[in-house]
Amino acid sequence: KQEVTQIPAALSVPEGENLVLNCSFTDSAIYNLQWFRQDPGKGLTSLLLIQSSQREQTSGRLNASLDKSSGRSTLYIAASQPGDSATYLCAVRDYNQGGKLIFGQGTELSVKP
Amino acid sequence: ETGVTQTPRHLVMGMTNKKSLKCEQHLGHNAMYWYKQSAKKPLELMFVYNFKEQTENNSVPSRFSPECPNSSHLFLHLHTLQPEDSALYLCASSQDLGAGGITDTQYFGPGTRLTVL
């Protein structure tokens, strides 16, 4: 059964740093992988979606990569800002579970001014 | 603000109460979802509706009863809940259930924070 793990669980960095969030999944049979942002007490906002045939996607200061064969994805955030503070969730759309989204537990990011 | 709204945003209820959560999407989507997010746990899919028909019940206890009267509205009826049901309940919608399609991004509402006493 697909499992998604995110490391680290929490991360605190000073403003301006470049940082990498990691996501791993146990079954490479996926349709796509998606990164979400969740602010405290709020719903999820989709940041980037990478199809299984793609290697990376970029949006502004965010870059997400996907290595399906090794079951890994990274979310790179350049020049971090306090406004980037949130929980970042990784989710895969699992082929063997009818396309269900399987989520990791998230990485709680705090960017200090 | 997303195109998915949820009411109420916060709800406190006793174990013998009956209450309902409401979700509405203004995106013209055909698929709607209920998720549960407990503290320190990954989001768990509860129910899926596609074109008003329930397509998935992820082994959810019967004290949670979903209803989808049309493609824009989704309800979650609650009765005789337990304290461990306290969580953030998130609603989402997508164009449809075309798994793997380029437009299958799910759009989430802000959630209802439920506390069961």
Image (cartoon, rainbow, N blue to C red):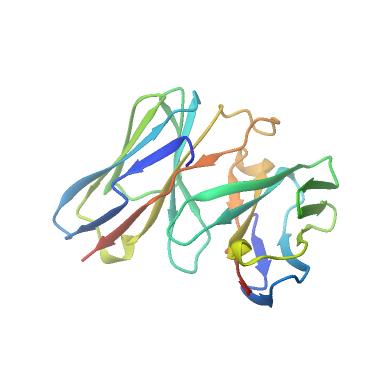
B103 to A78, vertically: above or below: above
The number of numbered badges drawn on the structure is 0
Q: Is residue B117 left or right of residue B66?
A: left
The quadrant in which residue A25 appears is bottom right
Quadrant (top left, top right, bottom left, bottom right) of the C terminus of chain A: bottom right
Q: Is residue A100 left or right of residue A81?
A: left
B60 to B113, vertically: above or below: above
Coordinates of residue A10 in the picture (x, y in percent): 61, 74
Coordinates of residue A112 in the picture (x, y in percent): 62, 75
The quadrant in which residue A18 appears is bottom right
Q: What residue is rendered at 60% in x and 62% in y?
A: A83
A89 to B4, vertically: above or below: below
Of residues B91 and B62, the one nearer the viewer is: B91
Of residues A30 and B103, the one nearer the viewer is: B103
Q: What residue is rendered at 78% in x and 57% in y?
A: A71
Coordinates of residue A53 in the picture (x, y in percent): 84, 40
* Residue furthest out toward the left: B16
> Could one spot residue B33 in this view of the protein?
yes
The quadrant in which residue A103 appears is bottom right
Coordinates of residue A50 in the picture (x, y in percent): 75, 44
Q: What residue is rendered at 70% in x and 46% in y?
A: A48
* Residue furthest out toward the front: A113
Quadrant (top left, top right, bottom left, bottom right) of the N terminus of chain A: bottom right
Q: What residue is rendered at 73% in x and 53% in y?
A: A27
> Could one spot residue B56 in this view of the protein?
no
